[in-house]
Amino acid sequence: MSLSVNLRHLERHAVTLAGSISPAELDLVIADELIRAPHPLRYCLTVERVAEGLLVTGQLELLLACVCARCLKPFAHTVRLDPWTCHLPLEGEEAVPLHGDLVDLTAPVREDILLSFPQHPLCEPECRGLPSAARNTAPTPDPGAQSTGGASAWAALDKLNL
């Protein structure tokens, strides 16, 4: 079931839509492996007819399950668009597709929700990342091993006459 409104209902007055829609129904495709959307999107919207279009206002809220990009700790992040406003033209090049008398609001809702996702999810702004002992696991080079192991990459450049 998509999020849609009937144009005939808008002839007399504005229509209020409230409820929730699952990520599958929203067709929410998340490319970031650090972000998941296991919960439904909650919405409370008012749709009214203005000139040759629709004006949609209200609130959108989606609870995300994220993993911190620095410390890999799971945490919850709420995407809240309050207030949210969208103008949907009914005529011209940018017109929204009509299915009989129904206008599907799913695509503009999905686009704005995806644009509000965190680009670099952090459990807290001051997150320092993994403990320092885990970061220093790379072996330290042995100075004696380098001199017996052969010429360095810079030795070949030192031979150039420029």
Image (spheres, grey):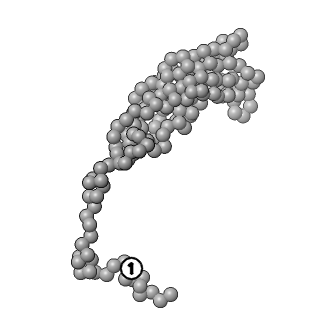
Q: What x and y, as percent, mark residue 10?
A: 68, 14
Frontmost residue, 2 versus 123? 123
Furthest residue in direction top, as rendered: 12
Residue drawn at point x = 59 percent, y = 26 percent: 83
Quadrant of residue 138 within the rendered picture: bottom left
Mark 1 residue crowding within 10 angstroms, few (<14) / some (14–19) / many (20+) = few
Residue drawn at point x = 55 percent, y = 19 percent: 44
Frontmost residue, 139 versus 14? 139
Please tell me whether mark 1 sits on a helix, a strand or a loop: helix
Q: Is residue 92 visible?
A: yes
Q: How many marks?
A: 1
Q: Is residue 122 left or right of residue 132?
A: right
Residue drawn at point x = 47 percent, y = 35 percent: 29
Residue drawn at point x = 70 percent, y = 28 percent: 89
Amino acid at pointer 1? Trp
Q: What x and y, as percent, mark residue 42?
A: 49, 22
Residue position for label 1: 154
Quadrant of residue 57 within the rendered picture: top right
Q: Is residue 153 above or below residue 11?
A: below
Furthest residue in direction front, as rendered: 126
Q: Is residue 12 above or below residue 103?
A: above
Q: Is residue 106 visible?
A: no
Furthest residue in direction right, as rendered: 51
Q: What x and y, as percent, mark residue 160?
A: 45, 86
Q: Is residue 76 left or right of residue 25?
A: left
